[in-house]
Amino acid sequence: MPINPFINNLGFNKYNYSDRMRRMFGGEKTFIDPYTTGYHFVYFFPPDTIGQEVGQFLTTVCQSVTIPNYTVQAIEYTGLNGMKWEVPGLVTLNQQTFDCTFTEMAGLPITQIMGRWVTIFRNVLYGISDPSAQNTYSQGAYKGKAVYATTLPDGLTVQFAAVFTGVFPLSIPTDKFGSDVTNHDKVEHSISFSFDQMLTGTAAESYARTLVQSTRSAGITLSDNIYAQETSSN
């Protein structure tokens, strides 16, 4: 059966339309949980020339993610006396990028990562691809992958997931290094990433769920270990 990523598990019985006037759900037969933002995970799989440990670090320091939406481009027809009607035309993403905000650390790892990544395909000094490596202008050398997931507050139940293919950064964030003696704020970089395709649906959700479960399990285990260590009498 052909894949349609937007009709999976479609059904409204669980929403219990018994309170149409007040538009409030829950408290009678079922409880309807709202979708709440702020619980997200983004996993980067950069090209081998960067290293997978870099992807793990970017996951850790990513503060926010903005992704594109699909837009229907209508085609307009004009008839007699200027009467008009429209039919759907192309269905496209409104932009071929997604944006992430990262917290910068001492040592400037975010800037170094993006600079290293960009330099693979365009060394800013020479104006050519990295002269110290071979075949660096091949797409396989500079394009990676990213997986985005947003969850319920349990940090486990995936609500939406997207797999981005052909990912590479569109900037080296040096603009935040200006300074003001009256201001001592933290530095955060907003980076736009180009991608080839954004894939959604149950397969993307299943893939993201595996990554999220691993992250959640490791995080809880680490917290338990720290608690046990700090409360131990030995």
Image: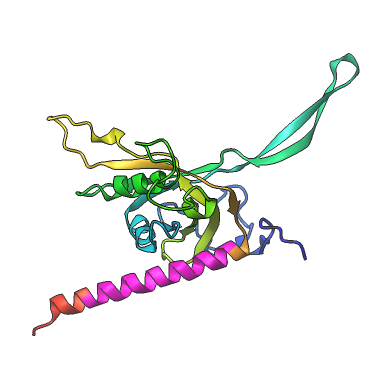
Q: Quadrant of residue 182?
A: top left
* Location of the C terminus (image quadrant): bottom left
Residue shown at 35% from the left, 58% from the top: 54
Residue shown at 66% from the left, 60% from the top: 12
Q: Which residues are magenta?
A: 204-225
Q: Position of residue 101 (x, y in %)?
A: 37, 45
Secondary structure mostly seen in magenta is helix
Q: Quadrant of residue 174?
A: top left
**Taking 137 as reference, is 109 left or right?**
left
Is residue 66 a member of the stretch shown in magenta?
Answer: no
Residue shown at 41% from the left, 64% from the top: 155
Is 68 drawn above or below residue 36 in the view shown?
above
Residue shown at 62% from the left, 60% from the top: 201
Q: Position of residue 69 (x, y in %)?
A: 58, 43
Q: Nearer the viewer, residue 2 or 83?
A: 2
* Location of the N terminus (image quadrant): bottom right
Q: Position of residue 165 (x, y in %)?
A: 55, 54
